[in-house]
Amino acid sequence: MTFLAPAVRFLLDYHRRPRTNLRLLLTRFLEKYRGRDKQALTRTIYGVTRKEIVLEHVIGLFLKKKDRPPPLPTLILLKISVFLLLFSESYPEYAVVNEAVNAAARKEKAFVNAVLRQMLRRRAEVKERLAASTDPALKYSLAPLLLAALQRIGAAADSDLEYLDREPLFHLRFHSGRMTMEQAQLALEACAIPCRALPRLGCFETATVGRFLDQAGHLDEFYLQNSGSQAVALVAASRAGKKVCDVAAAPGGKTLTLACLRPDLKILASDIHPLRLRLLEQNVRRLRLGNVSSFAADVLRYPAIGRPPDLLILDAPCTSCGTLRKNPDLKSRIDRRRVLENARQQRLMLDSLAARFSGSRLLYSVCSFLPEESEEVVEKIAAGRKLRPADLKPMLQKLGFRVRQGEFGFYLLPSELNNDLFYISLLEPIEPGNRSRRTAHGVRPEKAPNSNFQNQR
Ligand SMILES: C[S@@+](CC[C@H](N)C(=O)[O-])C[C@H]1O[C@@H](n2cnc3c(N)ncnc32)[C@H](O)[C@@H]1O
């Protein structure tokens, strides 16, 4: 067991950068590791971040001075050790304790030893208490802010919370203009990538993403895209006329799917970050897509583009809380301030598009289930700019998604498709002379708390 000290170093660095994405930081950090060490570090770091809240709770049980937590490096070391002792069967307990004491700062060694030995003595009791806990925030190690939002959209049943706590599965799409599902399946089998076909979406699901990435050179027609993200592109493909602007397009998943499915479309893909846009451009070249033009642009200062598009896609930057399986650090990292900052930016972006392209349809999406980033954004803009939501429910359900209908859009809930949680709203201009308060779902109801969702299992 030699990975404890590097795991502490990594998590310390990560904790000191509250805005950094765990996956990106970890990928860079792991470059110098190979084989077993790399696997152990990956499993441990993701495991600890997935269980952050419950680990803090357990450590708290063994602190004498509850209001004086140990220094951050010691706290992180304890979290890793408690994680290994409670949630991993991979290492003997004496090895965990010895290694933790070795890795602790000299003046913290006795303290670390005492906490871990007490924890070991009461391990069975701690496990029982956690299993019997009726507090879902503790049981699933989920921040109360996120739990409350899941409750609001009817996705806080044990099965939903357990789903969000699982390790992610990955979806592989391919250029559907160049190969059939059968040919794609044969190509994946030839590279020994075990997968499940999802024919309604036209993609495959795999747990062994590493193998796909290792073989990517042999699978040029394929790219990774979660099934939830595909839903946005599939909606766009079904509703677009001739010209589409994807205005926050990088790294490009939705643009790629749209371009593969609709080679007849003219797609203008832009993003404020030129570097992220390069990823999109690389994929466009690799998949030999001739119908995508890309350029860097700020949505808030969108350049002149000639004839307006009939559809704009705004896949807005958000907290990404819908991707908790892939980004388990977000379970404890999203705070109210960040949510409100995002919501303000999302409103500005959507409003500037609605003002500038008043005759176009607007497809708004976020990989978030927080009302502040979803319904509340769309509600404000739709009312002010005379837009009404289209009914996407039949299409989304036909694709196999479990959908919760809001007043202005649709939440993709946990489902058999192993999708990230998404919010999707398609806004259409209300034709002149048809400015009633009718929505695509019928007459808009008077507002009542929590009455604007209908469960669609
Ligand atoms: C959720 S990501 C988009 C993901 C992309 N649609 C896909 O499917 O791969 C949001 C994107 O918005 C971009 N962004 C943030 N602020 C922007 C702005 N003011 N104008 C244009 N793009 C912006 C970010 O750089 C980021 O790439």
Image (cartoon, rainbow, N blue to C red):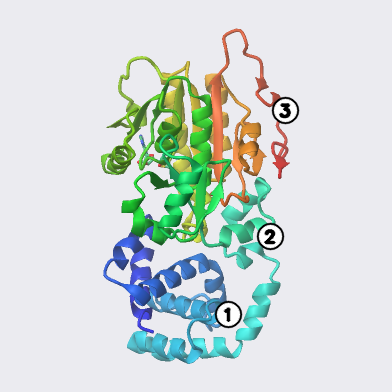
For this rendering, which residue is in front, 336 or 301?
Answer: 301
Mark 2 element type: helix
Eye-nearest disc, 1 or 2: 2
Which residue does the numbered mark 2 point to in the structure image?
Answer: 158
Mark 3 element type: loop
Q: Specify the label residue 77 is tagged with.
A: none
Q: Residue at x 62, y 43 (%)?
A: 401
For this rendering, which residue is in front, 420 or 237?
Answer: 237
Q: Earlier in the sequence, mark 3 or mark 2?
A: 2
- Where residue 411 sits: x, y (%)? 60, 41
Q: Quadrant of ligand 1?
A: top left
- Where residue 337 sits: x, y (%)? 47, 49
Which residue does the numbered mark 3 point to in the structure image?
Answer: 445
Query: Marks 1 and 2, how far apart in space?
Result: 25 Å
Eye-nearest disc, 1 or 3: 3
Query: Marks 3 and 2, how far apart in space?
Result: 30 Å
Query: Marks 1 and 3, how far apart in space?
Result: 49 Å
Viewport quadrant of the N terminus: bottom left
Q: Is residue 369 left or right of residue 440?
A: left
- Where residue 75 sits: x, y (%)? 44, 76
**Image vertical order of residue 99 relative to residue 183, above or below:** below
**Image vertical order of residue 313 relative to residue 214, above or below:** above
Dot 1, crowdedness within 10 Å: few (<14), some or many (≥20)?
Answer: few
What amino acid does circle 2 point to? Answer: Asp
Q: How many marks?
A: 3
What amino acid does circle 1 point to? Answer: Leu
